[in-house]
Each structure stands twice: as structure tokens, then as C-alpha cells.
Amino acid sequence: MGKKAKTAAVVIGTGVKVAAKYGPQAKIAWDNGGRKAAASAARKARSLTARRKAMTHAATVVDGSVLKVAPAGTTAYVVFSGDEPIATFPPLETPYSMLLAHADLTKRVRPEPGDHRSLPRGRR
């Protein structure tokens, strides 16, 4: 047996011992952390999608603006035409009066003209 083969056998043997010893803990940590990270990333993606849709909608109405609210710990965006709320993204069953009861309406933002950020389309 050559020197390289011996070294490889020692490294593989050590790797197997470490995997057998710490594998179960590593799997548990990966499962818990991985699920939480995936759920957090999905929530953030849904929020960004809702914001983009709200801004697009606000850009199409007269005197459109958007206000971010957080009913029941989730993020929602209320679209206004002037001072009148006209839509929420994502769509909610909660009436506008309850959504906006404690909201600061001065924090509404107006969509920038031509502010259409999109992901690159890639190769065709």
C-alpha cells in the first residue's frame, strides 16, 4: 500500500468516525435551522411581491400612494387613490377602517415614475 493510499484511508476513517459521532446532531440542527430559514425567506419574498404589486397598482390610479401596515404580525400594503383606500396587497378580509385605525397616514409613499425594477430575464 502506497503512502497516498494510507493517508486516504486515515482521512476516510476519521471522516466516518466524525460523521457517526456528530451526524445526528448536525442533521437536527440543519432541519431546524433550514426550515426556519426557508420560512423566513418565503415570508420576505411574499412581502416583496405584495409591495411590488401595490406600487404598480398605485402608479395606475390618480394620486396613488401606498402605506405599509402590519395587521396581526403580517405585512400588508394598502393602496390609496387620494385619501381613499382602494386595495390591499396581499388581499385581506379585514375592513380598511380596522387596518388603518392606528396607522400614520403621513407615512404613505408614492411610486416613483418609471420605477420598474425587475430581475434579469436570462438567456433566451
Image (spheres, grey):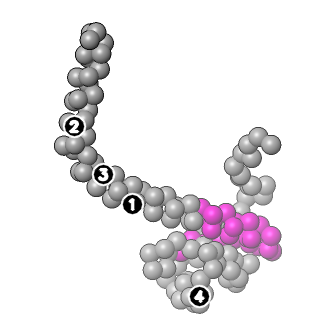
Please, what is the three-letter code of the amino acid marked with disc 3? Lys
Q: Is residue 66 above or below residue 39?
A: below
Whether 62 is among the magenta residues is: yes
Magenta extent: 48-69
SS assignment at label 3: helix
Q: The N terminus is located in which quarter?
A: top left
- Gap in Å between the C-alphas at discs 2 and 3? 13 Å
Q: CA distance from mark 4 to mark 1?
A: 27 Å
Residue 15 position, x and y percent, is 26, 32
Badge 4 vs badge 3, beta-carbon distance below 8 Å: no
For disc 1, the marked residue is: 36
Q: Which residue is tagged 2? A: 18
Q: Which residue is mark 4?
A: 93
Label disc, if present, on residue 27 of the rendered structure: 3
Q: Earlier in the sequence, mark 3 or mark 1?
A: 3
Q: CA distance from mark 3 to mark 1?
A: 14 Å
The amino acid marked with disc number 2 is Val
Q: CA distance from mark 2 to mark 4?
A: 53 Å
Q: Is residue 122 left or right of residue 24?
A: right
Q: Is residue 97 left or right of residue 57?
A: left
- Judge whether 50 appears above or below 23 on screen: below
**Please, what is the three-letter code of the amino acid marked with disc 1?**
Lys
Residue 124: x, y in percent?
Answer: 80, 43
- Counting residues from the start of the chain, the first of labels 2 and 3 encountered is 2
Residue at far top of view: 2
